[in-house]
Amino acid sequence: MSETIGVYEIEDRSFPPPPDFAAQANTNDRSLYEEAEADYEAFWARQARELVTWSKDFHTTLEWELPFAKWFVGGELNITANCLDRHVEAGRGDKVAYHWEGEPGDTVTITYAELLTEVCKFANVLKAQGLGKGDRVAIYMPMILELPIAMLACARIGVAHSVIFGGFSADAIVDRCDDAEARLIITADAGYRRGAPSPLKATVDTALASGAPTVEKVIVANRCDLELDMVDGRDLWWHELMADAAEHCPAEPMDSEQLLYILYTSGTTAKPKGIMHTTGGYLTQVAFSHKYVFDIKPETDIYWCAADIGWVTGHSYIVYGPLANGVTSVMYEGTPDTPSQDRLWDIAERYGVTQLYTAPTAIRMFMKWGAQEPAKHDLSTLRVLGTVGEPINPEAWMWYHEHIGGNGRPIVDTWWQTETGGHMISPLPGVTTTKPGSACHAIPGVFAELVDDNGNVVTNGGGYLTITRPWPAMLRGIWGDDERYRETYWSTFEGRYFAGDGAKLDDDGYLWLLGRVDDVMNISGHRISTTEVESALVDHASVAEAAVVGATDDVTGQAIVGYVILRGGNEPSQELGDEIREHVGVKLGKIARPKTVIIVPDLPKTRSGKIMRRLLRDVADGRELGDTTTLADPGVVTEIADRAATDDEA
Ligand code: PRX
């Protein structure tokens, strides 16, 4: 345990909620915690009835047959009726749902009423393609409004969406479409990134040329006016289909446990897991956490989650949570340094953003760019600052606090996962005294405990993070693989959900998340499996064997370092190393491309033949990481060999 947890310096600074903030907060005392501790099912049932509109009330709050949960059993609802219709029906149709801003500076403002119409029209488009309840559709899109519209249109008619992050490769599209047997892909010609169109439809074409036979049709939104090869009978333009679509589509009631979406995430094997989320429980927890963790005031707030919808953060906190709560959100298409490094602060100032939700890796990048960038803008409208995706180091927390929050805004460090669906561990901004770098405590209704290697509960010090009771937004399983679901999450510690993270409890009962304890890397808050990258490396014709580790990186948290042994007949060279790196980029997508590939004559192994990753990580941490190939110099080889020998004897 100590090996993976390492030495962690506990912070002694603490920040109580500012009194004026607490005075107006949605909650400012321990009552929600107390209510949930007294009877957590009754607590969640109350939230479900208050925050969600049901067409038929549920009769049973929870049916729990470990590890399979059903929440709000017997209940019926339509998630889009909750996100759209009920706001319009209550006379809030003119309220802005999204202030969307394109990277080149073009903007669109869409109200709840307009969004409802677009969603209904696109739902009718999907119906006309023969899609309905029980089907799956893949979505591979840039951050344009057609993306939430497509997701909501699926949800309106009971089609499960599987959003594939736009940075993933053609192979990743094939794998995901095959696994989910997706019948249709919704994409766009491209999206703007760093000042230029970044193509998507072309990648879909490559994918469909090599596989994904279940995909019958491709619907293409036009974002960048690119010339495209439209395949006759397969490819359809979004705008042409929408031109003829009817504006009314009833919000059919769905069972509370109706599959809402599948979202693939990396595990410890090469095959990504299709995490399944259903309707009633998911909506309840995302609406609850969004309201209380960000202290949402729908009448006045301008909320901004600066994530990509391709990840779970965007699903829960750009689409479903904010829309369910009827708040106005900002949605931004592009990169934070285009055209200049103050782009985010410029957007925040112009729209008067009240909540900002981003990742530690982004904050560390802003630190690098310098405090003069946010200082150019008036950020006084901000009320709550959020972070997610990876542990936040106290320096980054303090910088966020000082330079973005003007020393007076609560910071909510939210720990959760694709699997958990919504926030699990986080301060409540009007209640919790925060400590820089700690996610503090489980939110009301969620129960977390640390355990040691033997499964004994740890009340002080390091341990493995587990969740002890089911929660409404929990994954309902892995698509098509119940056994893997049980094995991955519920078999390590009996009766407990094992998150895969290490954590530490301090003397005051605060939780400090310390990162993954398995073979999963966290690059800029994105989960990437070492095994997946290793498979992509050995897929290159010149590579005989590969080992991948996540080395420490100042900005991205971890950086991928691949060690490769070449097949006989190949000479190590810079060019070959670069080609191998690129190969991973093509196989998996740019985000999984190693920062460095080190060509080595051998890999350190234990006598039983296991690669000693920890040693490779140490070696990588001890080096200046180039952005490209590093040929193993004899020093490194000797170091690896020497240390392997010493460790093996130890
Ligand atoms: O290791 C934890 C880290 O991100 C993992 C989940 O990744 P993913 O499913 O991609 O979801 C990311 C966005 C919810 C976790 O197992 N992680 C997430 N949030 C935090 C975190 N680590 C520390 N602190 C956090 N706030």
Image: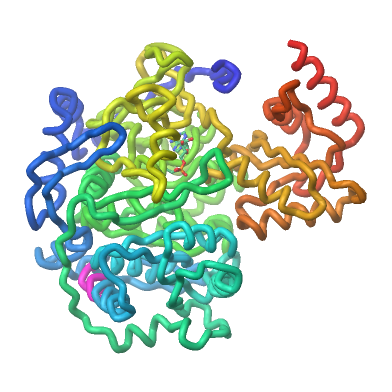
Q: Is residue 73 left or right of residue 115?
A: left
- On the question of residue 20 being in view, the answer is yes
Q: Is residue 647 left or right of residue 585?
A: right
- On the question of residue 198 being in view, the answer is no
* In the foreground, 498 or 17: 498
* In the foreground, 240 or 606: 606
Residue 408, given in percent of the width and then of the height, sits at 36, 36
Task: Magenta stretch: give its range.
Answer: 112-117
* In the foreground, 4 or 608: 608
Is 495 drawn above or below residue 243 in the view shown?
above
**Image point 23% across, 67% down: which residue?**
112
Which of the image's four quarters has the N terminus?
A: top right
Q: Is residue 507 left or right of residue 576?
A: left
Residue 62, given in percent of the width and then of the height, sits at 17, 37
Residue 8, given in percent of the width and then of the height, sits at 54, 19
Magenta-drawn stretch, dominant element (helix, strand or loop): helix
Which of the image's four quarters has the C terminus?
A: top right
Residue 556, given in percent of the width and then of the height, sits at 60, 42
**Image point 52% across, 35% down: which residue?**
396
